Structures are given as C-alpha cells and as structure tokens.
Image (cartoon, grey):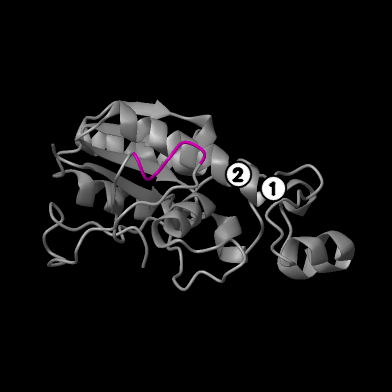
Amino acid sequence: MKETILIVVRHAETAWNREKRMQGTTDTPLSDVGRVQAQALARRLAGEAFAALYSSDLSRARDTAHAIAQHSGRELVLEPRLRERAFGVFEGLIADEIRARFPQEYARFASRDPDYEVPGGESARGFTERCLGCLAEIAGRHAGEDIVVVTHGLVLDSLYRAAHGLDHGVQRPVPLINASLPESFRVRLEQLAHGGMGRCESPRRGGDHDLSRQRRLMS
C-alpha cells in the first residue's frame, strides 16, 4: 500500500515574524511580503497531485492555504488543533520585553520544562499532544494519499522532533522558514501515534527538481 505523505508547510510571513514578536494564538495577518510568498508557494504546489488541503484556522495560515486552494482547486479544511502553541502573556512581545516584564516566567520557560505553562498559555507537552494527534488523525483519514497541511512553526518543530527522536530540551538543529517546502515525511501511522509520542520516517533524498519524489519539511 502506498505510504501517506504529509506535505507540512509553515505559513507565509507576518510583520510579527519580521519583528520577532511572540505570536502564539494571536491572529496576526500576512504582511505584503507574506502575501507574495503565499502566491509563490501556491504556484509551486499547483501541479502536485495531493488529495486534501488542511490548515490552521488562524488567518496567517488560513490565507496562505487559501492561495494554495485557489491555484489547485482543492477544498480547504480548517482545523483549530493545528494552531500555534498558546503563549499567553508573552504574546505580542519580543524576547527582551518578555525578560523585562516577566523574568520569573521567562526563566521557567527558558528551562524547557515540557510541563510548564506560561500564564494564559499551554505547555509544550500538551501542545505536542494536540498538534501531532491532529496530524495523525488527518493521515489516518487519507491513508495512502498525499495531503498538504499549512500550519505554524512549532507544529513543524514537534513533527521534526517526533521524526528524529529529539527531546524537547534539545536545541533543534535546523531553522523553520516561512512558506518553504523543505523535506516532508512518509508518515507511518503505527509510529506517529495519537498523542504525538511516536516517530515518523523522512524519505530518502532525491533530486530537488522532482517534487513528486522529494518534498522538504525543514530547511
């Protein structure tokens, strides 16, 4: 049976991305650059034979996915569980402002305790269970098919960690690029278990020109 391919991409750029502000679940719009990125991504995916298109319902992801829907003719399905991790009182602030206003909370957050919840936010463990559980359900719904999922940076981070067995406390070695198509994973449903504690396998590298054989999740 053909393996299920999740083509998971981060939304296009927002002004807060450029300013390095913590976005979380705050509903920030795409910037002018982001709208151009979304159209470029949509054109690149237009020739792909994917079966379904899912997105976080936050507007920066939804509008990126809407561009893909327009170019591909696929129906867009919105899924709130694909939202970014909620960061509560940190949202809207840059790192220096967070350290100045919430020094104790920032110290706990910087310790990478997976069970720590920023006031008004959610823990890394709870977030991982939410988003990877959702991705596993989507993959199960479309067994043997290719699916495009437009979501947020830390959802990609969680999927990368599941794929590589990387603990939450370990620094991720690759960046997360807005509206990029880095290497996707061939998700094995028995490994990417509901709850997000399983593992998935990335495909062997092929020619970058051949998107039907290689799609990138991280760059």
Q: Quadrant of residue 1?
A: top left
Q: Is the C terminus in the top left, top right, bottom left or bottom right quadrant?
A: bottom left
Residue plotted at (49% across, 57% down): 157
Q: Mark 1 points at which residue?
A: 123
Residue 58 in the image: above or below residue 214? above
Q: What residue type is labelled 1?
A: Ser
Q: Main secondary structure of the magenta part?
A: loop
Q: In which quarter of the image is residue 28?
A: top right
Tell me where the magenta segment starts and ends, as one range. Answer: 190-195
Residue 55 can be seen, yes or no: no
Task: Give the numbered dot on residue 127.
Answer: 2
Residue 18 in the image: above or below residue 57? below
Identify the secondary structure beneath mark 2. Answer: helix
Residue 159 in the image: above or below residue 150? below
User: Is 7 on the left or on the right of 119, as rendered?
Assistant: left
Residue plotted at (80% across, 62% down): 108
Give the image location of residue 215, x and y in percent: 23, 56
Q: How far separated are the C-alphas under marks 2 and 1?
A: 6 Å
Residue plotted at (62% across, 66% down): 169
Residue 67 in the image: above or below residue 79? below
Q: Quadrant of residue 73?
A: top left
Give the image location of residue 76, x and y in percent: 34, 28
Number of residues whose C-alpha sits closer than 10 Å to that of mark 2, classed few (under 14), some (14–19) or many (20 or more): many
Residue 203 is inside the magenta segment: no
Identify the secondary structure beneath mark 1. Answer: loop
Number of residues whose C-alpha sits closer than 10 Å to that of mark 1, classed few (under 14), some (14–19) or many (20 or more): many
Give the image location of residue 10, x and y in percent: 42, 52
Q: Are marks 2 and 1 in contact (CB under 8 Å)?
A: yes
